[in-house]
Every structure is written in structure tokens, then in C-alpha cells.
Image: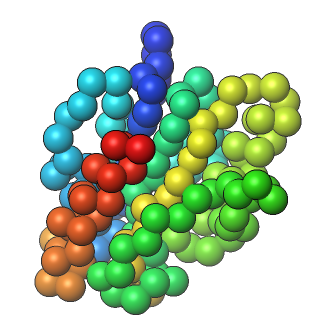
Amino acid sequence: MNAGSPARAVVVALGNPDRADDGVGPAVIQAIEALPEVEVWEAIRGGLPLAQALVGFDRALVVDACPALAVGEVALIPLFTADGPRTTDHGSWLHGMGLSQALEALGTAGFCVPETWALAIGVEGALPFRRGLSPEVARAVPAAVAEVNRWLAN
């Protein structure tokens, strides 16, 4: 995913646009403007494969649907704090991927892992197979885009 010299930052969207509000991650990154030294990807794999792809970046932001939040709520969550991983990543959001643990393991093995954050957008727990976001989640996209832009500015 990050062949050659990696950019300073990467924004990664997880989600399936064919599963209704699960497509909010791709919808957010389609709405952000390209910036120099920032790569933007859509990914379908999480966990160790995603963590390995992030190696070498300074900062990473993973945008995904989160049934643990109220529908339409937007939250920027650090995956690590000074005390270690912020989340156990065992829920269905972030694709149940264990990204924090994968990054921690790679860092322990000596790889340069990025400061990693999750931008979570609240969705219903059960998502149907259909294209298009619900009105509540579609209204959250501009707030999520603004949060991505604030994160990139810092």
C-alpha cells in the first residue's frame, strides 16, 4: 500500500459501501481534499495486514463506522495513550481487527509504527446490504471531514 517513500500521514477508510452505513468511511475520504505528504486509502483488511501497511508513516487516521456510538456521533479516539493501547479492538467497529495490538507488536519488534487514531462515526448495530448512507449518518459526514482536516492540521 505504501510503496516507495512513505508520506508523512495517511488516512485510511474502512467499510463496505454495499452495507449501508458501513460505507461511511469511504464516504468521508471521498469528501476530503488531497494534501501534499498525505496518502488516502480505502482498505478492506484490518489487523496485522493494515498495521504492516502503516509502518513507516509518522501518523495514521483510520476512519470507520462504529456501532458503539450513537448514530451520527463522530469521535476522534487515540489508539494509544501514554499508558498503552486505548482500545482492545475486539468490537465489531474497526472491523474487530486488533489494530492497536498489531501496531504494538510491530513497535516492540523494532518497526517504526505511526501515531494512530481512529475516527469513529456512529451507526446502527445491524446493517443491511444496500448502497447509500442513512440520513443520520450522511449528516455526520461533514463533521467527520472537518475532524479529518483538524487532525491533519495538527
Q: Quadrant of residue 26?
A: bottom left
Tell me residue 78's x, y (percent): 58, 59
Q: Quadrant of residue 147?
A: bottom left
Residue in front for this viewpoint, 73 or 18: 73
| Residue 33 located left or right of residue 105 | left
Q: Does residue 152 sit above or below 68 in this rendering?
A: above
| Residue 137 located left or right of residue 76 | left
- Colour scheme of this structure image? rainbow
Q: Quadrant of the N terminus?
A: top left
Extreme-top residue of the structure: 4
Q: Quadrant of residue 34?
A: top left
| Residue 68 located left or right of residue 43 | right
Q: Quadrant of the C terminus?
A: top left
- Could one spot residue 149 in this view of the protein? yes
Extreme-right residue of the structure: 108
Extreme-front residue of the structure: 154
> Residue at 30% across / 82% down in the picture?
72
Tell me residue 37's x, y (percent): 34, 24
Residue in front for this viewpoint, 122 or 77: 77
Question: What is the tally of numbered marks visible in this picture?
Answer: 0
- Could one spot residue 131 in this view of the protein? no
> Residue at 60% across / 65% down in the picture?
96
Residue in front for this viewpoint, 100 or 36: 36
Tell me residue 122's x, y (percent): 38, 79
> Residue at 40% across / 57% down in the picture?
63
> Residue at 46% across / 84% down in the picture?
69
